[in-house]
Image (cartoon, grey):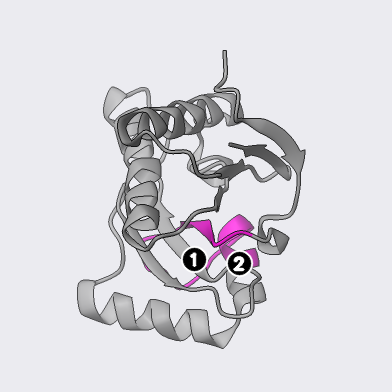
Amino acid sequence: MLDKRIKLLREDITEIKVDAIVNAANTSLLGGGGVDGAIHRKAGAKLVEECRDIRSKQNGCKVGKAVITSGGNLHAKYVIHTVGPTWHEDERNNELLEECYMNSLKLAEDNTILSIAFPNISTGRYGFTKIKAAETAIGSVEKFILEKKLQDKLSITNKKKEVKKI
């Protein structure tokens, strides 16, 4: 049973009015297809410039890790970029996907972000089924909430515009 604070909504992640949205980024941080491309297009040049700065300082972002930029032209003040794993029948990939959520939530906590929206990371061309990825997302967020005893609101979205609001 889901945490009672989780509610399903339908939204476009680039339009959600939260403190931060999470980008299902690639390791270059320079934009791509799907959610990544939509966020980069909507956020504009400031986001691209900040991603280039991060890339030049630390050579992008590794799988399972997360970095933060401003939200540029988005409603969200911040974008947290995380790189999901490519699906293989391997427990390590599930762990890396969980790390995407946990590291993003840790960055949110470190930056006093009270509301956050996630896409369904590692679906699409990365190959995770939407169900498997959503189970990992919900499980990771619930684990973080329990560990931190959070009372704040969080959101989880997927590419089909479904949002889970905590």
How far across and how far down the image is residue 23, in percent?
Answer: 51, 58
Question: Is residue 27 a member of the stretch shown in magenta?
Answer: yes
Out of 122 and 100, give the one closest to the viewer: 100
Q: Which residues are magenta?
A: 18-38
The quadrant the C terminus occupies is top right
- 76 and 5: which one is in front? 5
Q: Looking at the picture, tell me which residue is in the foreground, 138 or 144.
A: 144
Task: Determine the secondary structure under disc 2.
Answer: helix
Residue 104 pos. (x, y %): 38, 51
Q: Is residue 137 left or right of residue 10?
A: left
> Which circle's residue, 2 or 1, is located before the other in the chain?
2
Dot 2 amino acid type: Ile
User: Which residue is the site of mark 2?
Assistant: 39
Most foreground residue, 88 or 94: 94
Residue 79 is labelled as: 1
Type of amino acid under label 1: Val
Residue 163, position in %: x, y?
A: 68, 41
Taking the spot 31% from the left edge, 76% from the top edge, the residue there is 54
Say few, some or many: other residues with alpha carbon within 10 Å of mark 2 (under 14 / 14 to 19 / 20 or more).
many
Residue plotted at (73% across, 45% down): 161
The answer to whether residue 85 shows anywhere in this view is: no
Q: Residue at x 55, y 45 (%)?
A: 125
CB contact under 8 Å: marks 2 and 1 = yes
Tell me the quarter of the picture where residue 69 sits.
Answer: bottom left
